[in-house]
Image: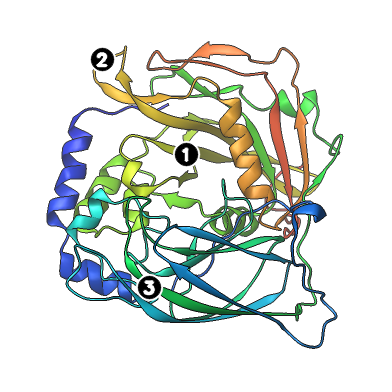
Amino acid sequence: MRTGSASLLSFALLALILASPARLAAQITGNDAAPATASTPQPAAQAATTPSSSAKQPLSKEFTLDGSKVWTDTGITLEPGQRIVVSASGTLRYFDAKADNGPGGQARGFKDLVRNLPDNGSGRGALIARIGDPDVAQPFLLGANKEVVSPISGKLSLGVNQSTSDSPTGSYTVKVEVYASDSSTPREVAHQVQSITGIDNDLFAKIPRRIGDKQGNPGDMVNFLIIGNEDAMKKVFTTAGWVHVDAGVKSTILLGAIASFEKESYLTMPMSQLYLFGRPQDYGWAHAEPIKVVESRNHLRIWKAPFTLNGQMVWVGAATHDIGFERDQRNNGLTHKIDPDIDLERDYVEKTLSSTGLVAEVTHFLPKDPMQEAKTATGGSFHSNGQVLILKLADSAAVPASSAPEQ
């Protein structure tokens, strides 16, 4: 659920006008993005090449990438902790470019506003990669040289950071070397379990079923819980490619107006404050293609519960997917329209977070008298099977007894 008005679009437009292309180019070309990865382990039958962790010699393969397609499957399935070293050479030439570009890509400019690139934080034509499920894996920059440690299992794909309509001439020659894991701390696999101790109707009696606006109008359904400390919670979202959204609409608009065309600038505009446990959300997270954020994005709000579970923090969240705009029935203003099948967004949260290697256990719980159909405060309808997703994080220490009451 989102409150707002058409004026928000005007502020977003102001952000684009104020952004400096020169400043943009300096920021983007100086960005050496760390890989934000997401995947689910692939079946063995799909793994054309799986490097052995005990191999003394690295696996080495060479590829030629041209502009005929965006992504190339390397046939390599990585294991958690394996290190890949990539080196690339060659040039591409886009028909509207003044010069060739190498694997580092072109400097970004105003024209890039109308392009939706796989990695909007990198220049057009840059060499990029992703690990895992294409639906949730976050592309990251390789450039001419890069060394990356894979945090999870998944297929490695190489890509050219361009839109599907681009057709440059030229090619890149890319060498990939895969080394055995040198990590003594393997990543967790998110185990599907039947239940988690303490997740029961007594717990859900302490959790409101819905969040609301400042006036108390009921809104989105509470559809997921995360068990883990604050640092672990933030780490799992950022690893999965979710971007932290500013708490207040006013501050978000201001930041958007003075920022450049970076991915985070788009994703953080704007998210209104909603309430649970008598206070606004502690965190907002968004996940989307930047060019579509004004209209569409995956987003959620999350609150720290006023109790712990088995000595660990509990985070209560509501996730929905913005798919367009509709009339706010409270004031006839403009507000975001959510996908009425909110279970799809709950499942999207599960898929992106579970694939990071930072989730230990996953389950679903059906509370007593589950919520299955309702309307948001703005008048939009939604439906659900009533189940709440429960994620127990792996890297999470217990909360000191003095910091929060036990459940």
Labels 2, 3: front one: 3
Residue density around tag 3, few if under 14, some if 14–19, many if 20 or more, within 10 Å: few
Disc 3 element: loop
C-alpha gap between disc 2 and disc 1: 23 Å
Q: Is residue 120 visible?
A: yes
Image position, residue 403 (x, y; %): 67, 52
The residue that mark 3 highlights is: 31
Tell me which corner region of the image, top left, top right, bottom left or bottom right, holds residue 83: bottom right
Q: Does residue 373 lie above or below 225 as drawn?
A: above
Q: Does residue 257 lie above or below 341 as drawn?
A: below
The residue that mark 2 highlights is: 331
Residue name at image x 25 percent, y 56 percent: 112
Q: Amino acid at mark 3?
A: Asn
Tell me which corner region of the image, top left, top right, bottom left or bottom right, holds residue 29: bottom left
The residue that mark 1 highlights is: 299
Residue name at image x 44 percent, y 57 percent: 69
**Lower position in the chain sequence, tag 2 or tag 3:** 3
Labels 3, 1: front one: 3
